[in-house]
Amino acid sequence: MSLRIVVLLAVLSGVTGSPSVTPRPEADSAFTTVHPNSVPETVEETELSETLDILVEEEADEDVMATGELNPNHYQAQRAAKVVQHYLNTRYGSPYRLLGLHRVHSGNAEDVEDSGRKYQLEISVQEIISNTTEKCSAEVLFPSGGQQRSPQVQASCEELLKINTTAQEEALYQQYKMNKSLLSAQYLPDSYGHIDPDMKPLWHLCIVASSFLMLNESSENTLYNMAQVANITQLATENDQLKFDCHVLLHEMVSQEIIHWKLLFTWSPPEGVKVQQMEQLPHCHHCEKPPNTN
Ligand SMILES: *[C@@H]1O[C@H](CO)[C@@H](O)[C@H](O)[C@H]1NC(C)=O
Ligand SMILES: *[C@@H]1O[C@H](CO)[C@@H](O)[C@H](O)[C@H]1NC(C)=O
Ligand SMILES: *[C@@H]1O[C@H](CO)[C@@H](O)[C@H](O)[C@H]1NC(C)=O
Ligand SMILES: *[C@@H]1O[C@H](CO)[C@@H](O)[C@H](O)[C@H]1NC(C)=O
Ligand SMILES: *[C@@H]1O[C@H](CO)[C@@H](O)[C@H](O)[C@H]1NC(C)=O
């Protein structure tokens, strides 16, 4: 029982982002943590949706996408800004550089003839590991048309590039490369929101890889968050790229779905993270065994 409550608290603080409810000193605040066993279904679903009142209220007129100046706290601006976060992680993310959306200052949406809808945003982006924030200007184009195409993003955040993580990345790379056994980990974070400090770089790598996926999957009608790494396994390689197989749980906030994906990606300090394969796994409620039953 108490476990369930802790899990729920973790969900609450992730969802509301309220600094006053943070029983999770270990987890990075810009990412929600949801344990698979807390996948909203019955009781929890009710409680969870109550916490999402603000969001849900605003979803009421969801089909009507506003044009012109947007309320920065409104779902429309927030969704577009979240896409910028994923984009920045695909560009600049590393085991030691992780970007989160801090705040939307202003937003503007317009229809662009024949191509879709374009958002112009002024946002603050937080580099989670060094805890620095920077203002960025960004543009997000959600393409129109039948087949889903990924949003196109442009963003300028020059300060973020000045955080030099080369030395740390090189050291981690050597450590992973030289280790006799291949690494693996499960449940990052665990159901208490805890992550072993040694596993944080692996978790960060998975978040960056997931950003490729979340960027690709996003539309005006989605809001993706990384919920949890179910497991990550290092694979043997013959070249300089380290290779990982990662199962992630994404939380799509609009539909309230937890979605499983399997990602195959490589990493090296000069090349960064490259996703080679993404595969959505079938729905799998409660099919994995709990990590800790005591
Ligand atoms: C990050 O920095 C802000 C302001 O500089 C500070 O208020 C906050 O407590 C810091 N957060 C962490 C997790 O260190
Ligand atoms: C991105 O999504 C599109 C479908 O929207 C898909 O065709 C494409 O393969 C995806 N990209 C990657 C790298 O998987
Ligand atoms: C980052 O630091 C490394 C040394 O650790 C240095 O060789 C490199 O030039 C620096 N890169 C940038 C962009 O400042
Ligand atoms: C390296 O390998 C050992 C086992 O050979 C393992 O216990 C350890 O966790 C590995 N870790 C890292 C981060 O290098
Ligand atoms: C990783 O997690 C997924 C989803 O929970 C599961 O299907 C898979 O068997 C797990 N793999 C390993 C190696 O634990």
Image (spheres, helix red, strand yellow):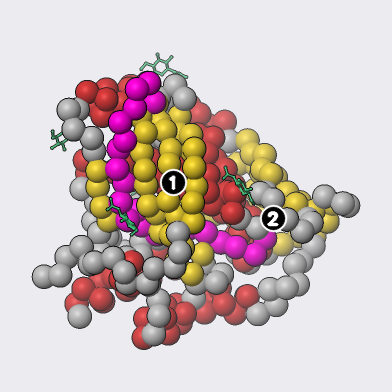
Left or right of 214: which side holds 258? Answer: left
Q: Where residue 155 sits in the image (x, y, percent)?
A: 64, 39
Q: Where residue 3 sits in the image (x, y, percent)?
A: 21, 73
Callout 1: 10 Å neighbours few (<14), some, many (20+)? Answer: many
Is residue 237 shown in magenta? yes
Is residue 15 shown in magenta? no
Write down the residue under mark 2: 148
Quadrant containing the C terminus is bottom left
Residue farthest left in this picture: 294
Beta carbon of the mark 2 residue lies under 8 A of ligand 2: yes
Identify the secondary structure beneath mark 1: strand
Mark 1: which amino acid? Answer: Leu
Quadrant containing the N terminus is bottom left
Left or right of 225: which side holds 219? Answer: right
Is residue 26 shown above or below 239? below
Q: Where residue 260 sits in the image (x, y, percent)?
A: 43, 59
Is residue 272 shown above or below 127? above
Label 1 vs 2, first from the N-terminus: 2
Left or right of 184: which side holds 258? Answer: right
Is residue 34 shown above or below 5? above
Q: Which mark is residue 263?
A: 1
Mark 2: which amino acid? Answer: Gln
Identify the secondary structure beneath mark 2: loop
The quarter of the picture where residue 105 lies is bottom right
Q: Which residues are magenta?
A: 220-241
